[in-house]
Image (cartoon, helix red, strand yellow):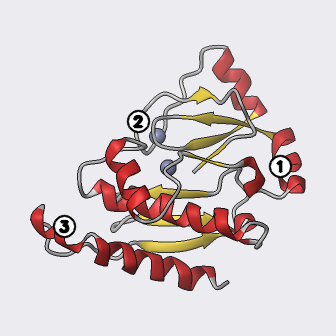
Amino acid sequence: MDIQKRLFEEWEKACAQFRSSFEEAGIARVPVPDLEVSGKKVRKMGICYYPGGKYRNGCVQVFAYVVSAWNEEEMLNTIKHEIAHLISYYFGSKGHDKIWKNVFIALGGSGNRFASSKALHPDEMRSYKIRKILYKCNCMSHEITIRTHNKIKKGFKYQCRVCGGKISEVVDPDRIMC
Ligand SMILES: [Zn+2]
Ligand SMILES: [Zn+2]
């Protein structure tokens, strides 16, 4: 599967699907976001950046190891998950709220905030567990080094640079957030 191509196709499909909703909301044109396949090694499936800052039109990224065709269905679900973030953003959504969920389902996604642990190859799962600790805020998951994790335990304040929220440790590390 050509992931880059798929990202564009799914984005176009989503925009067409929500065209009348955008019109009703008075949004004439939704700019095409950056659609990227990232080679970064982070313990998540995908990420969405809202417009502004580094990405003027927003950005949807999926991570390369997800794209290794280990689980095509989960990968497609991830693409829909992240695109749903950007679409619902234009309707006032932040993070994994009800608006996002409805859009995600409308796009044919699972509606679940977390991907199945089967989405990652077992080898990948193992390697990520050792080095990093999974935290989350209101909008995404965060890869925290052991060093930072220890600092947080001692009272260091770590804020998400996207939503500004506090992050907290994910108790069940087998569940991956997108
Ligand atoms: Zn956040
Ligand atoms: Zn998400």
Which residue type does callout 3 highlight? Phe
On the rendered image, what quadrant is the N terminus found in?
bottom right
Q: Label 2: which residue?
A: 164
Q: Residue at x 54, y 23 (%)?
A: 157
Binning the other alpha carbons within 10 Å of mark 1 as few (below 14), some (14 to 19) or many (20 upward) gives some
Tag of residue 125? 1
Which residue type does callout 1 highlight? Met
Q: Is residue 48 left or right of residue 58?
A: right
Which residue extends farthest top?
154
Q: Label 3: which residue?
A: 22
Compute the Cα span from label 2 to label 1.
Answer: 28 Å
Q: Given this view, does label 3 or label 2 mark the residue nearer the observer?
A: 3
Q: Residue at x 84, y 55 (%)?
A: 124
Q: Label 2: state its secondary structure.
A: loop
Q: Given this view, does label 2 or label 1 mark the residue nearer the observer?
A: 1
Q: Is mark 2 within 8 Å of ligand 1?
A: yes
